[in-house]
Amino acid sequence: MKAAAINLDVAGLPRSESKVLLLGFDPCRAHRKSSNKNYMLRIFLGILVVVGGFLIVWQSEWLYRNLGPVDWAERKLGTEGGTRLYYKLIGIAIIILGLFIVSGIWYDLLNGLASLLGARPR
């Protein structure tokens, strides 16, 4: 039984793949287009999250008037404005999360957390 030889063209690709490239379809370029869409979606989502966090920080008094005081925050965060500080801290955490999403660090953090819990990162 003879081993089948792979017929390579000048670019080092198998002949079937080079024919696909000659027809105008580049699988690498198609992947770049889809990742570009993911990139734009990631930026849009991250900016949306940052704006939401900013609104929480900015309108903490409105949140306090409509949602009322948080007993845990009043006891643990000190002064009369413990609930307002609590809302502002939540807003700042959301802003940081949005910046992580925009920069792509969020996915690395999730992969690190998953590997700590025993899952294999992709």
Image (tube, rainbow, N blue to C red):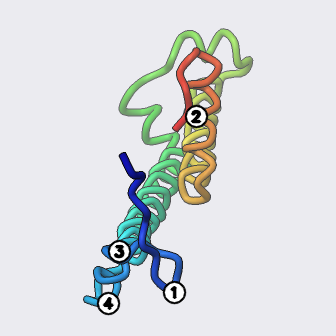
Name the spot of residue 107 as percent of width and height, x first: 55, 44
In this rendering, the answer to whether 34 lies above or below 114 is below
Please tell me which of labels 3 and 2 falls first in the chain: 3
Specify the quadrant that holds the N terminus: top left
Q: Is label 1 in a helix, a strand or a loop?
A: loop
Name the spot of residue 110 as percent of width and height, x first: 56, 34
Please tell me which of labels 4 and 3 falls first in the chain: 3
- Asked if disc 4 and disc 2 are in contact, CB closer than 8 Å, the reply is no
31 and 108: which is toward the camera: 31
Q: Is label 4 in a helix, a strand or a loop?
A: helix
Query: In the image, is 51 to the left or to the right of 80?
Result: left
Residue 111: assigned label: 2
Residue at 39% across / 51% down in the picture? 2
Residue at 63% across / 49% down in the picture? 105
Camera-side mark, 3 or 2: 3
Instruction: Report the Cα–Cα distance between label 4 and label 2.
Output: 38 Å
Please tell me which of labels 2 and 1 falls first in the chain: 1
In this rendering, the answer to whether 93 lies above or below 41 is above
| Residue at image mark 1 | 10
Camera-side mark, 1 or 4: 1
Residue farthest left in this picture:
23
Please tell me which of labels 3 and 1 falls first in the chain: 1
- The amino acid type of the residue labelled 1 equals Val
Q: Residues within 10 Å of mark 2 (few under 14, many from 20)?
A: some
Instruction: Report the Cα–Cα distance between label 1 and label 4.
Output: 13 Å
Which of the 4 quarters of the picture holds residue 33?
A: bottom left
14 and 97: which is toward the camera: 14
